[in-house]
Amino acid sequence: MSAARTLRVPGRHGYAAEFSPYLPGRLACAAAQHYGIAGCGTLLILDQSETGLTVFRSFDWNDGLFDVTWSENNEHVVVTCSGDGSLQLWDTAKAAGPLQVYKEHAQEVYSVDWSQTRGEQLVVSGSWDQTVKVWDPAVGKSLCTFSGHESVIYSTIWSPHIPGCFASASGDQTLRIWDMKAAGVRIVIPAHQAEILSCDWCKYNENLLVTGAVDCSLRGWDLRNVRQPVFELLGHSYAIRRVKFSPFHASVLASCSYDFTVRFWNFSKPDPLLETVEHHTEFTCGLDFSLQSPSQVADCSWDETIKIYDPACLTVIPA
């Protein structure tokens, strides 16, 4: 693996890292003081240089920030979500407070995602209040609220293929697929016998999702037949905090865990574990693939570091 570019952020514990879809090498990181239990939060906007990572801008919020997502129609705009139940819309080109604050959720907002399909500019949020909300960032209030989960919601993600369709993962051990047009849940999948902390949608297959759970397993789900997973990936020794499909390779994904590792997998292979990266000394919570460089990955951890690197396994796969 190439040497990681590392930025240490004293007193800030990383929760989420997301590469810009527009600006090569730019990264947003959501972080919190005191492991997110108390204190404030910080949004960091980072750029890569030859020597490492530099802070382009940072923004503070009065509660821990748990997730971040880039706008798909403005290269400077990001949305974060926080422990006070609010979402914040930031203009990273200006050193100022948020342009908008959306405060409806009754408890921590743990997940936020900007829609990927053309013609839609929507944000989905998932909260510990057991609801999912969909927002038009241009409107000050949510467009709709989706109820049904029976425990906290940890992860909400738009389908990159189907407009108005998103998935959610919850402490109630289910993965749910929702449709704005149907104004409700389409599919309920009892995906694990444990809390599900993360889910993601395959970029190359509109029917394929992956879940990562407290039971240390990753499971793939084909929405056309959800009776059993189409793959199961075992190897992590503690809860899986986040999982992401590669934007460049149809069967490659990455996961990060409370076991401090990041693991890379190819679920189409008999021996699916490609590589284990052990460069953190605390829970690893944030993870993303670069959208510009096929081999580049970013992660962040409670050890107060953010890293960008090229795992060996991704430098040898043909694009």
Image (cartoon, helix red, strand yellow):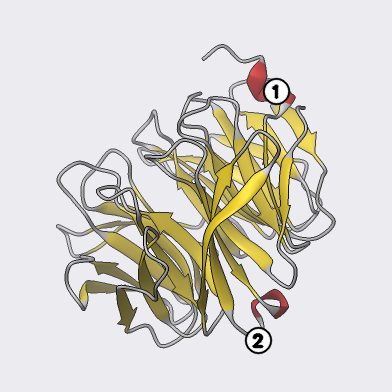
Q: Label 2 neighbourhood size at 10 Å, few (<14), some (14-19), many (20+)?
A: few
Q: Nearer the viewer, residue 233 or 21?
A: 21
Q: Is residue 49 above or below residue 62?
A: above
Please give the residue where the numbered disc 2 appears in the rendered image.
38
Q: Where does residue 260 sit, x and y in percent of width and height?
A: 79, 53
Q: Residue at x 61, y 15 (%)?
A: 317
Question: Farthest top residue?
Answer: 318
Q: CA separation, marks 2 and 1?
A: 38 Å
Q: Is residue 36 left or right of residue 20?
A: right
Q: Label 1 neighbourhood size at 10 Å, few (<14), some (14-19), many (20+)?
A: some
| Element on which disc 2 rests | loop
Q: Nearer the viewer, residue 180 or 4?
A: 4
Please give the residue where the numbered disc 1 appears in the rendered image.
313
Q: Where does residue 140 sit, x and y in percent of width and height?
A: 20, 77
Mark number, residue 225: none
Can residue 115 be seen here?
A: yes
The image quarter containing residue 137 is bottom left
Q: Nearer the viewer, residue 289 or 307?
A: 307
Q: Where does residue 278 sit, x and y in percent of width and height?
A: 82, 43
Q: Is residue 98 above or below residue 291?
A: below
Q: Where does residue 221 sit, x and y in percent of width and height?
A: 48, 41
Location of the N terminus by quadrant is top right
- Amino acid type, mark 2: Ala
Which of label 2 and label 1 is nearer to you? 2
- Amino acid type, mark 1: Cys
Q: Residue at x 68, y 49 (%)?
A: 256
Count of picture labels? 2
Q: Residue at x 64, y 77 (%)?
A: 36
